[in-house]
Image (tube, rainbow, N blue to C red):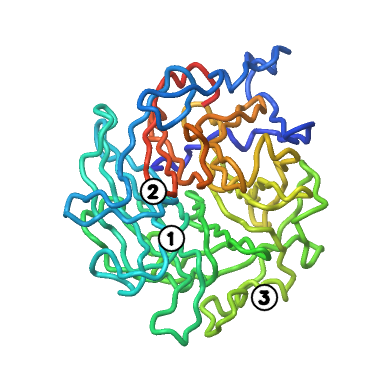
Amino acid sequence: MTRDDAASGIGRRTFLRGTGAAIALSALMTGTAAAQGRPAPAGGGYGPLVPAPGGELLLPEGFTYVAFGRTGEPMSDGTPTPGSHDGMAAFAAGPNLVRLVRNHERGAAPAFASPSYDPQAGGGTTTIAFDTAAMAPVSTLPSLAGTIRNCAGGPTPKGSWLSCEETFTGLDVPVPHGYVFEVPATADAPVQPVPLKAMGRFVHEAVAVDPATGIVYETEDAGLSGLYRFVPNNRDDLAAGGTLEMLAIKDRPQYDTRTGQRVGPNLPVTWVPIADPDPDSSDSSAVYNQGHALGGATFARLEGAWWGDGAAYIVSTSGGDLGAGQVWEYRPRGNSGGQLRLVYESTDRDVLESPDNITVSPRTNGLVLCEDGGGKDFVRGVSTDGEVFPFCEVNGGNSSEWAGATFSPDGKVLFVNLQTPGVSYAITGPWERGAL
């Protein structure tokens, strides 16, 4: 997204443990169903899922979709569209025009464009210009090539996409991986890839950038993972270096967030330094081990991240007593280290299982979560009254993860990716009818 305050208002949510989904959000304003003591309408106000015109997706009545950018389709320069579509963000590019920067979580394979960071790496990004009035792509071009397993990332205040490698390889191979790369949303040709080594070399997932300070919060997708922050020397030039730190809970060294947590209480935070963010090691936990030794906290598979209303919202895909997922909020507090609190923990896999990417509706501040579970996956919505509801499903079911959910800046189009077989969807309809 281009709006750094796209989730404005989300920090005023109060997430409380409830039955079933183990989540309830307090009403953000008077006039909501919860505030008036009435039950919220089913399906986030949208009703049940039905076959949408075209037949590929199940959506609420009145919603339609356009499928585009399928794996193998020729892009504007003739290059076949790479597969394994993943994280994505939408940037304003003019009247009725957005630019989507889309990750491709591919591994070892010839690079699909040049210049490339590693000629033997098949991941990277593509950039799509999309006309939201015509509901059609205008152009698609490669924008980053020669990277590996580009899973998620995040938009920056200056209008670029930080694409993260969800991998780690030792320096005994020709080209090391495990870095973050920056891609301007305006790029019309593959950028010269520059690994942002000061931001750390580990199994990256997503980032969330604080627009007030330029600090970048980074997630790590591992069974034992840390939450990091990168404090840049120059917020407008991340390649100019900076310092990397790992979150720790004040006076509770090596705190384990994975189980035994309660929704609500604030945990005061400190940050411990990572002395060697780019370790010469074959150990994928080399950065985590540095921070943990100094008291850093442990999370379970940190994946999606989004910034809004002065806080970073972080998804732990397998956290919680059930292992079905948690959502954490980190909020900076003046000169202190800030505060961390658990705002969500799933206790029912039928309601939500293994949330991954997260985004926020700029229209209502409702949440959108992409599932990456072991069975049938949904794009789920979460209303500001606390209802978790299915919003999108493959017609006939699917075992592939959803990824890259992001709204157009005006909130009228939801873009989302189905990783396998690799296709992007633009969804629109009567948003005003419900929670998103």
Task: Give the vertical position of 249 relative to 178 (above or below).
Answer: above
* Callout 2 amino acid: Gly
Task: Give the vertical position of 316 relative to 346 (above or below).
Answer: below
**Location of residue 69 by image quarter:** top left
Q: Position of residue 113 (x, y in %)?
A: 25, 64
Front residue of 219/175: it is 175
Task: Give the vertical position of 350 relative to 109 (above or below).
Answer: above
Q: Position of residue 165 (x, y in %)?
A: 46, 65
Alpha-carbon span between mark 2 and mark 1: 14 Å
Give the residue at mark 2: 422
Outermost front residue: 396
Pointer 3 with pointer 2, Cβ within 8 A:
no
> Which quadrant holds the N terminus?
top left
411 lies left or right of 27 = left
Q: Position of residue 87 (x, y in %)?
A: 44, 50
* Callout 3 amino acid: Asn
**Location of residue 66 by image quarter:** top left
Alpha-carbon span between mark 3 and mark 1: 23 Å
Q: Residues within 10 Å of mark 1 (few under 14, many from 20)?
A: many
Give the residue at mark 1: 150
Mark 3 vs mark 2: which is more N-terminal?
3
